[in-house]
Image: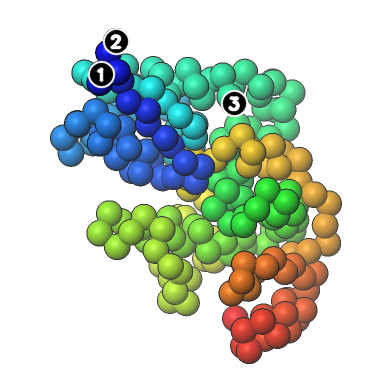
Amino acid sequence: ASAQSSRVVVIYPGYRKEQVVAQFGNALGWSPQRQKAFLTTASKSIPTLTEGKFSPGMYVVETGMSESDVQSMIYNQFSDRYLERYGTSTQEIVPLKTALTIASLIEREAGSREEMRLISGIIWNRIFMGMKLQIDATLQYARGTSSNGWWPVPRSRDKYIQSAYNTYTVAGLPPGPIANPSVAAVVPALNPKKTDCLFYFHDADGAFFCSKTYEEHVQALKKSYGRGK
């Protein structure tokens, strides 16, 4: 293959499926119709997942590749990175879809690798206690569109959005992943840090705070922002 006929496509951790297909579509010159076709056929490769199966990383594509060619390449990468490492004993404890869903929340919420295991611990704490997850990234996913951005800044009124992905109103995990997580996020999803924290937020500088009680959480918010949420 000549240098002109191949291109590198980069899929960043935390991308939505629409961002993924846009990357491939731009590199391969696909029309909007072909991009849509790719998403509908891609959803058949791992039937239980519409999101979360596009493994972040670098892909080399060749001019003229079909949707099914790209789909096969993505599936092979997903298989190498996730399925090969995912033993049946792990699957029995935490099904792959659950792990990828939690990993996608961690990917979108954590500001650093260090925070990933702690946020995982908080998510698991809430799941075990039957608390609503109340994760802003799920509101962004519910609201995101090509016109107002795939990850719009959350607003207070978003907490009342009618969506199965709204973790402020619907208990438990969303129906599936909200993004495509990296292996770096899947590992902490399966290995949460033990913590007493149930609440967390990032301040304006990106510093991470977590609290054991709602009262402590409100106090920390007031200290950082001069108000409680």
Identify the amino acid type marked 1: Ser
Q: Nearer the viewer, residue 217 or 74?
A: 74
Is 123 placed above or below 99 here?
A: below
Asked which secondary structure carries label 2, the reply is loop
State the residue at coordinates (72%, 28%): 90
In this rendering, the count of numbered labels is: 3
Q: Does any portion of residue 191 appear in the rendered image?
A: yes
Identify the amino acid type marked 3: Tyr
Q: Is residue 199 left or right of residue 82?
A: right
State the residue at coordinates (49%, 35%): 56
Asked which secondary structure carries label 1, the reply is helix
* Circles 1 and 2 in contact, beta carbons < 8 Å: yes
User: Residue under circle 3?
Assistant: 82
x, y (%) of residue 106?
61, 50
Asked which secondary structure carries label 3, the reply is helix
Q: Which mark is residue 1?
A: 2
Q: Which mark is residue 177?
A: none
Single out the mark in the foreground, 2 or 3: 2
Q: Which mark is residue 5?
A: 1
Mark 1 to mark 3 CA distance (whole Å): 29 Å
Q: Nearer the viewer, residue 45 or 163?
A: 45
Q: Nearer the viewer, residue 126 or 19?
A: 19
x, y (%) of residue 123?
68, 54
Mark 1 to mark 2 CA distance (whole Å): 6 Å
Q: Earlier in the sequence, mark 2 or mark 3?
A: 2
Q: Residue furthest bottom?
A: 226
Q: Is residue 122 left or right of residue 72?
A: right
